[in-house]
Every structure is written in C-alpha cells, then in structure tokens.
Image: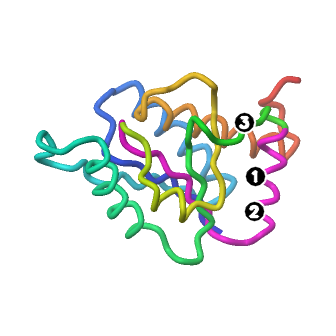
Amino acid sequence: MRITLLTMGKTDIRWVADGLEMYSSRLGHYAPFAVKELPELKNVGALDKEQVKHREAELLLKAIKPQDCVVLLDEHGEEYTSLDFAARLGRWLQAGKDLVFVVGGAYGFAPEVYARASSKLSLSKMTCSHQLIRTVFAEQLYRAFTILRGEPYHNE
C-alpha cells in the first residue's frame, strides 16, 4: 500500500517546500509516501478556467491507476476532526489499495476528475492556496498516523 500526494505544478514557495519535505520524511516511517508533482500547463493565457481544468484533468487522470483509491482535496469535501480523519485513514488503509490524494490547480477540478474520485476531503471551510495545502495536508496525514499508533504528537 502506497500513499501519493499528486499535485498540479511544483511549489515555488521555499518554506512550503521545506515543510512538505519535512513531513514527507516523517511519513516514510509509517507508509511508503511520495509527492508527485505534475508539470504546470504552459501557454494557457488564451484558455478560460474550464479549459484549463480539462487539460489538467487529462494529466491527473493519466497519473492515477485504475485500482487506486482517489481522494480529492477539495473545499467542498467532507470535513473531519483530526481524530475522525485518523479513523478514516485507518479504514482506507485496511482496504489495502494505494491511496492517491490529489491537489488540483488554482481553479479546482474538472467534472471528469470528480467522477473518478472515491472521496473528497476538505481541510478547512476556508480556501487555501493549492501550494500551501500540500504542507497542511502532509502535516495532517502525519498527525493521523501518530494518532493511529498512539504516539504523543497529537494532544487532545
């Protein structure tokens, strides 16, 4: 069972990349974890938002295997407390499929990506930058693993 964080584009914010790298390293102690950053689209100035989302969808869907459990990080997804997210992660892990958490581009996801998803997860009712959410998610995933293992990272 592998866990992948699939993103559109690379982050150009150093402290976001540093945080993501730190939590990625920590996550490796619990499960095989990788960040896969797809290249940003080029020459999109003449495209509208929907056209950009459809082009990004093509790249995202090519990167997902048919058997993967796909969870979109989406502002309209289900919200969890940290304890509830840990429990949900535990159920996903028990299913034995590779987990792919997906961060879309600046405009979100095209309908075909929503159709492929197994679940949608919201980390906040507030909208977060598609770059920043990578590190926030990696920290929450790390927190969930420590909760599942009974380790003293989460204080509640």
Residue found 64% across the figure and 43% down from its top: 121
> Mark 2 belongs to which amino acid?
Leu
CB contact under 8 Å: marks 3 and 1:
no
Which residue is label 3 attached to? 79
Please tell me which residue lies in front, 112 or 73: 112
> Mark 3 belongs to which amino acid?
Glu
The earlier-in-sequence mark between 2 and 3 is 3
Compared to 71, does 86 lie above or below? above
Q: For the magenta stretch, what is the residue range?
A: 84-106
Residue 100 locus on image (x, y percent): 56, 59
Q: Residues within 10 Å of mark 3 (few under 14, many from 20)?
A: some
Which numbered disc covers residue 89? 1
Please tell me which residue lies in front, 29 or 79: 79
Residue 26 locus on image (x, y percent): 61, 43
The colour scheme applied to this rendered structure is rainbow
Q: Is residue 60 left or right of residue 52?
A: right
In whole angstroms, how far apart are the C-alphas of marks 1 and 2? 6 Å
CB contact under 8 Å: marks 2 and 3:
no
CB contact under 8 Å: marks 1 and 2:
yes
